[in-house]
Image: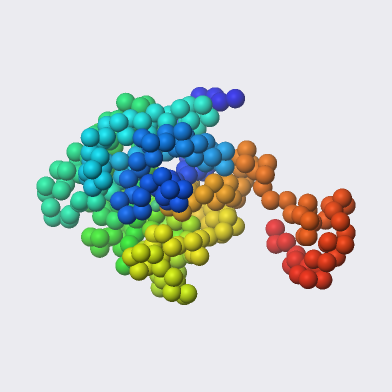
Amino acid sequence: MPQKPLGLLERLVAGPVICAEGYLFEFERRGYLQAGAYVPEVVLEHPDLVEGLHRDFVHAGSDVVEAFTYYAHRVKLKIVGREKDLAKINRTALAIARKVARSTGTLLAGDICNTSIYGIDDASSHRQARRIFDEQIGWAVDAGVDFIVGETYSFGGEALLALEAIKRSGKPAVITVSVPREGHLREGWTAAEACRRLEDAGADVVGMNCARGPATMLPLLREIRAAVTCHVAALPVPYRTTPAEPTFQSLTDPHGISGPDGRPFPTALDPFLCSRYEIAEFGTEASALGVRYLGVCCGAGPHHVRSLAEALGRRPPASRFSPDMSKHILFGTDKRLRQDYLEYARRTYGSAPPASG
Ligand SMILES: [Zn+2]
């Protein structure tokens, strides 16, 4: 029975907050938007499916319903010839998210992101970015969001512009940067330095999202946690990135398999996907570092979110169906199973190593 939810900052004081992301990759896999431009056209064409994925993520343990307005800004809509749908796609995405958040007692988040036109010394691009942020934030405020996420900035300066725009709205601001292959933002700022500047400029939560998998995001999170006093966010992509290939854009497949662009990113990343247990381990480690705002970005499915929630000691509704191998026909232990099957499996596969916990 949903009660009036506590605000984001109150929840962060009390414990971890989980925010599921990854809507673009999931709908691309399902065939409802296109890899490349990655514009969330599914919001207009199949709002029922967007509502369904929000509900799947809440069922799996997300505390936040993030409106699917990522890349629903004028520059991105223009590139697919749908600039006229700008207001409609934002208002629709926010209305869908609001419906799910208010019916489940979760938080409603507005979402703005990298503009794809920002240039460091390009003043006209800064004006364009401000306009993009202000109009998307305006629709989010109209929808009554609880807070606003500004995400996936590889320019610290662009992240600061996004933060200023959110601050003008009076809503709490979660700002996450996306650290490229070189290990620093495009200006040369380290992730920790960018986060410290964002905290100084008034961000409520700072951290990282996208681009990096758990293995190559955790070391930078440690530096961020030491550099700021506010809450820290971490939403890696669920892919097995390495020190040599620290972002999902830089991964190469040992079998030589790649997508149409000659690299696994973004449509041939399947062999690198983290299991739910790796995401659980990430949740445990990030939590031990003091990271409170946790999620998974592009590539995530509800099973990852459920494991993250369980690693934080939660039992979301989807945990009712968390694995129980005792009833498996080959590897189970239940007395009702055919014992000759179990013996066959023991001969063929050996017995499993003892569970580690
Ligand atoms: Zn992402």
Q: Pick whichever, 222 or 343, lies toward us.
A: 343
Relative side of 131 to 33, left or right: left
Q: Nearer the viewer, residue 306 or 231?
A: 306
Image x and y of residue 222, in percent: 44, 59
Q: Is residue 213 placed above or below 242 in the rendered structure?
A: above
The residue located at (45%, 37%) in the rendering is 50
Residue 186, picture quadrant? bottom left
Q: Is residue 238 above or below residue 170?
A: below
Instruction: Count all numbered tags in the image, as a single digit.
Output: 0
Residue 18, position as x, y percentages in the image? 50, 43
Residue at the (25%, 63%) spot, across then down: 188
**Residue at 20% over, 51% down:** 117
Residue 273 placement, left or right of 66: right
Taking the image as shown, residue 284 lies to the left or right of residue 177, namely: right
- Vertical placement of residue 155 versus 240, above or below: above
Give the quadrant of the N terminus: top right
Q: Nearer the viewer, residue 63 or 300?
A: 300
Judge left or right: residue 153 versus residue 348. left
| Quadrant where the image shows the C terminus | bottom right
Please tell me in which quadrant of the rendered image residue 217 appears: bottom left
Work out whether 330 lies above or below 107: below
Q: Position of residue 310 (x, y in %)?
A: 61, 47
Horizontal and vertical percent position of residue 118: 20, 51
Residue 5 is at least partly visible in this image: no
Colour setting: rainbow
Task: Tell me if residue 38 can be seen.
Answer: yes
